[in-house]
Structures are given as structure tokens and as C-alpha cells.
Image: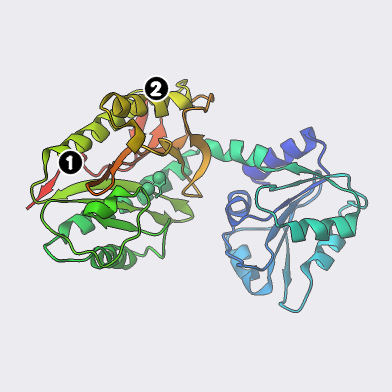
């Protein structure tokens, strides 16, 4: 059994769980190396202490699960079959006759599927499997960091591509399409979220929508993008100036850069997570822009682009070696525009490494 599954099984035993039903593609991938997007169909990894685990997936995906290296049981079902019939049978065959406690991903398992479990197994007490899985996924091993580093390099390439095509009159969507086209040519099938290319006043919304806005001199240009590579995500934001910008725009750029540097400087094992947020927030507040930084400093990154931990000022947990997260302060001024600078960060034994490496000094594209 792989180390991840055995760690998870240990948690099930310690917490007296009769079985676990893991349904999210990210946690199924983490535990089995099988990546499947089932849409509305059922995907499940069932883990039973002291028994063999089994996967349940649409029949057409079975060979992919095998190719991913899954050697235990796989139940493939057709679109006219009820997968819970097979699940009940397989659990009972593993001695799970009248379970009392089950671990599920409480945040996302549908109420309908919980009802199916209750119908077949009667009174069940449910526990949050996320408690264990978020903790396990928090610390990345060497092979995960290697993939995250490559994904980050491709995000750098995406920004570099976008910057290289900026010219008077080009639209946000034209720049966006060029970035994604060039990444696809490098084999990237999926971005880790909808790419943002925002010009001028559009960059004044933290999560604005790219459209037909044409680029003109004096605009700030904000790129926020990332790729999925071998199941792992990257996420970078860079802001550049197109032509000369005014003093206000320069001031917010320099403030955000100073804020990001302040958070990076204290990134090392033992730092309270909330202090990473506060380091940047204090710089931005001291410069008089506190109300224009409306989000937390960042989020964990890995199999999902936003994962545990939440890097908010209230988080009292400490950074640990092997954690990966983003640092992405921003200042967004309606009408004027916004600046965000975001890196993916890996905590080393005594400090940090930024996985994204695209330059951060203010670039003025002429
Ligand atoms: N791309 C969304 C974020 O940076 O969190
Ligand atoms: Mn981002
Ligand atoms: Mn982010």
C-alpha cells in the first residue's frame, strides 16, 4: 500500500472509522494517483481499515485507473447501473455489515449521496475526512515540489508570452488567447483557473473579467494565470506598465512590491501564518491603501490551485518545511487600476524558495 493510503488508513483506525468514502477528484488523485473528472457521475475511493481499498468509477475510465498504477479492486459501472448497489456489495464483502462511523468529505459530498449511504447502511455518523487529508497534503514531498517547480516555470512562460505581445490596440482576449495557445503548444491541456489579462481600469477589480478592452498607453496590465501539469497547479500574477504611467500608479506598484517582499522575508519554518498576511497588510495600510487590499495574502497550492491552508491574518498555525502557498498582495483603485504581485512559495529548511521566478521590478513596456 502506498504511504499516502497507509497514513490515511492509520487516521481512520485512530478515529474508529468503519470506512471512508473519498469522492473529490483531488483527494482520489492524492491517494491513488488516478486522475478522473467524472462530471456528475460517481467517483469513489473506499478505504476500509485492515481490508483492501477499492475504486468505483465510470466503466469507460477503468483502463485509465489501471494505467495510473492502481493495483487494487476497481468497480466500473455503466450509465444504466446504480453504483451504490456495487458499493454496498463491496463494503459488505469486506466485513462492513452495519457500520456506525464513516469518513466523508463533508464540505463537498452531495446530500443526495449521503442519503444513499444512509438508506443502505442505516444510522451512520459522519466524520470529516478533510481533517486528515488537508493535513497530509499540506507537506509536499520532493516529487511534488519538482512538478510544482515545472508548473511554475510554465506560468512564468505564460506571463513572458503575454508581455511580449503587448501593443497599442490589442485586446485583453487577444493577449489571453496567445498565452494559452503558446502553452497548449507546450503540451498544457488545462489552465489552473480562467486566465486573467486586465488592462487599465479593469485591473482595478481583483478578479475582473477579460474582454474586448483595447490596450492604450498609460495602462497597467495585470496577468493572473497558472497551469495544471501532471495534476499539480501553478498561479502567478504580474503587473506591468504599458507606456509611461503616472505617479499614483507607480506608488501603488512600489507599495505592493514592498508588501510582497515583507511577507517573503519572514517565510520560514515557525512563522505564524497570520503574520505572513499581516507583514504585507501593514505595509499597504501604512501607505494609506489598507481599504484597497480586500483579500487575504494567499492560499495553499498543490493538486488544487486553492487548497489548505488559508493564509489569512487570523490563522495561528505555523509555517512548516515542505509547505507551498501563494503570496499575492494587491491594491485595487477603481478607475485608476490595480496592481497584484503573486508568487508560489515553497518553505525550505531555513527559509523559502519562490517557484515562480518572473522578474518583479516595474517593467515599462514601450
Ligand atoms: N488566481 C486566483 C488567485 O490568485 O487566487
Ligand atoms: Mn492568481
Ligand atoms: Mn492565487
Q: CA distance from mark 2 to mark 1?
A: 35 Å
* Quadrant in the picture for residue 344: top left
Query: Left of 47 or right of it: where is 176?
Result: left
Find ligand 3 in the image and state its quadrant: top left
Mark 2 or mark 1: whose residue is earlier in sequence: 1
Labels 2 and 1 touching (C-beta < 8 A): no
Q: Can residue 156 be seen at all in this image of the molecule?
A: no
| Residue placed most toward the observer, 96 or 204 | 204
Report the residue at 77% width, 52% height from top. 52
| Residue placed most toward the observer, 168 or 76 | 168
Report the residue at 20% width, 33% height from top. 254
Helix, strand or loop at mark 2: loop
Please give the label number shown on residue 12. none
Report the residue at 67% width, 56% height from top. 23
Report the residue at 80% width, 65% height from top. 84
Dot 2 surroundings within 10 Å: few (below 14), some, or many (20 or more)?
A: few
Helix, strand or loop at mark 1: helix
The residue carrying mark 2 is 350
The residue carrying mark 1 is 249
Residue 301 appears at what percent x and percent y? 46, 43
Amino acid at each position: 500500500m502506498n504511504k499516502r493510503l497507509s497514513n490515511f488508513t492509520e487516521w481512520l483506525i485512530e478515529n474508529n472509522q468503519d470506512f471512508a468514502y473519498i469522492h473529490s477528484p483531488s483527494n482520489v488523485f492524492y491517494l491513488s494517483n488516478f486522475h478522473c473528472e467524472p462530471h456528475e457521475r460517481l467517483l469513489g475511493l473506499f478505504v476500509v481499515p485492515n481490508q483492501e481499498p477499492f475504486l468505483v468509477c465510470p466503466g469507460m475510465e477503468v483502463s485509465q485507473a489501471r494505467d495510473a498504477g492502481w493495483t487494487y479492486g476497481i468497480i466500473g459501472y455503466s450509465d444504466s447501473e446504480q453504483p451504490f448497489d456495487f458499493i454496498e456489495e463491496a463494503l459488505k464483502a469486506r466485513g462492513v455489515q452495519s457500520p456506525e462511523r464513516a469518513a466523508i468529505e463533508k464540505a463537498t459530498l452531495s446530500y443526495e449521496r449521503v442519503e444513499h449511504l444512509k438508506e443502505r447502511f442505516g444510522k451512520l455518523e459522519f466524520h470529516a475526512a478533510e481533517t486528515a487529508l488537508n493535513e497530509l497534503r499540506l507537506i509536499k514531498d520532493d516529487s511534488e515540489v519538482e512538478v510544482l517547480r515545472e508548473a511554475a516555470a510554465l506560468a512564468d512562460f505564460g506571463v513572458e508570452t503575454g508581455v511580449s505581445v503587448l501593443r497599442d490596440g490589442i485586446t485583453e482576449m487577444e493577449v489571453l488567447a496567445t498565452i494559452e495557445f503558446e502553452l497548449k503548444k507546450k503540451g498544457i491541456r488545462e489552465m489552473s483557473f480562467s486566465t486573467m489579462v486586465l488592462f487599465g481600469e479593469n485591473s482595478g477589480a481583483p478578479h475582473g473579467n477579460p474582454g474586448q478592452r483595447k490596450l492604450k498607453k498609460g495602462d497597467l496590465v495585470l496577468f493572473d494565470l497558472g497551469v495544471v501539469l501532471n495534476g499539480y497547479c501553478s498561479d502567478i500574477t504580474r503587473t506591468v506598465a504599458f507606456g509611461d504611467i503616472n505617479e499614483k500608479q507607480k506608488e501603488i506598484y512600489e507599495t505592493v512590491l514592498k508588501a510582497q517582499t515583507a511577507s517573503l522575508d519572514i517565510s520560514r519554518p515557525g512563522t505564524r501564518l497570520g503574520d505572513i498576511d499581516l507583514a504585507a497588510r501593514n505595509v499597504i495600510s501604512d501607505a494609506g491603501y489598507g481599504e484597497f487590499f480586500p483579500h487575504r495574502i494567499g492560499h495553499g497550492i498543490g493538486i488544487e490551485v486553492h487548497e489548505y491552508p488559508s493564509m489569512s491574518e487570523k490563522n495561528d498555525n505555523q509555517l512548516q518545511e515542505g509547505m507551498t502557498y501563494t503570496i499575492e498582495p494587491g491594491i485595487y483603485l477603481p478607475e485608476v487600476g490595480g496592481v497584484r504581485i503573486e508568487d508560489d512559495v515553497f518553505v525550505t529548511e531555513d527559509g523559502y524558495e519562490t517557484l515562480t521566478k518572473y522578474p518583479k521590478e516595474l517593467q515599462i513596456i514601450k
